[in-house]
Image (spheres, rainbow, N blue to C red):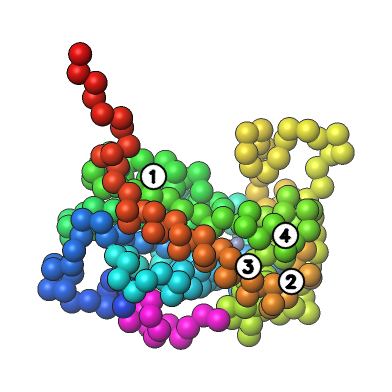
Amino acid sequence: MLHNRYSGHAFEKRFLPRLSTKEVEVLEKEDAVVVLPIGAIEQHGPHLPIYTDTLIGEGLLVQALEMLPEEENIWVLPPLAYGKSTEHLGMPGTITLSASTLQAVITDIAKSVQQSGFKKLLLFNTHGGNHDLLNMISRDIRIETGLTVFRLNPDYSVVASLISEKEQKFGIHAGEVETSMILALKESWVNMDLSPTEFVQLPEDTKHLYLKGSSYFAWVMNDISNTGVAGDAASATIEKGRKINALVSQQVASALKEMIRFDISTVKSPLQLF
Ligand SMILES: [Zn+2]
């Protein structure tokens, strides 16, 4: 379950804006990872809140931080609740930034993080539509600021055994996984009576083309779904959601640990002198 905002371990101990400027000044910053969660506010079918992606990001981070030893050097920023959701534009409730605005906002935040003395920034993304842009932005921030920049998307391969093969392949939006996760985080915000099951249907002989990956066709939600859902939302349950949240948070926690210990200056093999 999602904690009341501003209570619990994540907000009491690891929420950067709860500190004073003096406290931020004296933090040990060499290995500290500052986490910027980036979500979206966009339609998620007739049954889920438009805040779904941002809420999932916050829920996963809260749980991941609880799994780590208290002293792990991680500082969480408030989520950037708006993402690039142009694929859902026109569907009521979708509030999107353009790619250039999102890039400008994230770059300004990164520069401020760097000027506060931090060396590492994680862009923690829970909205698929942000993915490509964030890969580009993270490299540009590295070039512009010298920060070590990480980009992390939750890894849903760890929950493959809990969902059907069809859902694994085509459950890309507001389906069984996301609906279960929100049920476990904030049940009162879900209306299961309205939860649809709708899958994308690619032509039968399709071997290469897919919604993402190496052979891709550009799409907006209206091209691939009638209900605004791609997946089996009707099969979602709160129990499944608890398991998914725990497994995915565990992945996030272990990735965070690696980022704290990571030193980019050691990646290149030592210069051979002849
Ligand atoms: Zn989503």
- 55 is within the stretch colored magenta: no
Q: Residue at x 55, y 81 (%)?
A: 1
Q: Position of residue 232 (x, y in %)?
A: 77, 63
4 and 2 marks in contact (CB < 8 Å): no
Please state which amino acid type lies under the numbered disc 1.
Ile
Whether residue 38 appears in this view of the structure is: no
Mark earlier in primary sequence (3, 4) = 4
Q: Which residues are magenta?
A: 1-12
Residue 251 makes an appearance in the image: yes
Q: Secondary structure at mark 3?
A: helix
Q: Amino acid at mark 2?
A: Ala
Callout in the foreground (1, 2): 2
- Mark 2 and mark 3 residues within 8 Å of each other at the beta carbon: no
Element assignment for label 2? loop
Instruction: Locate residue 127, reporting x and y percent.
Output: 54, 57
Say which residue label 1 marks. Answer: 137
Q: Is residue 16 left or right of residue 225?
A: left
4 vs 1, front mark: 4
Q: Nearer the viewer, residue 208 or 226?
A: 208
Rate crowding at label 1 as few (under 14), some (14 to 19) or many (20 or more) other CA atoms within 10 Å: many
Q: Residue at x 69, y 77 (%)?
A: 239
Residue at the farthest front position: 274
Q: CA distance from mark 4 to mark 2?
A: 14 Å
Q: Point out which mark residue 244 bears.
A: 3
Dot 2: within a 10 Å radius of its alpha carbon, few (fewer than 14), some, or many (20 or more) residues?
Answer: many
Residue 236 marker: 2
Q: What type is the residue that disc 3 sits on?
A: Ile
Mark 1 or 3: in front is: 3
In this rendering, which labeled residue sits more in front, label 3 or label 4?
Answer: 4
| Residue holding disc 4 | 161
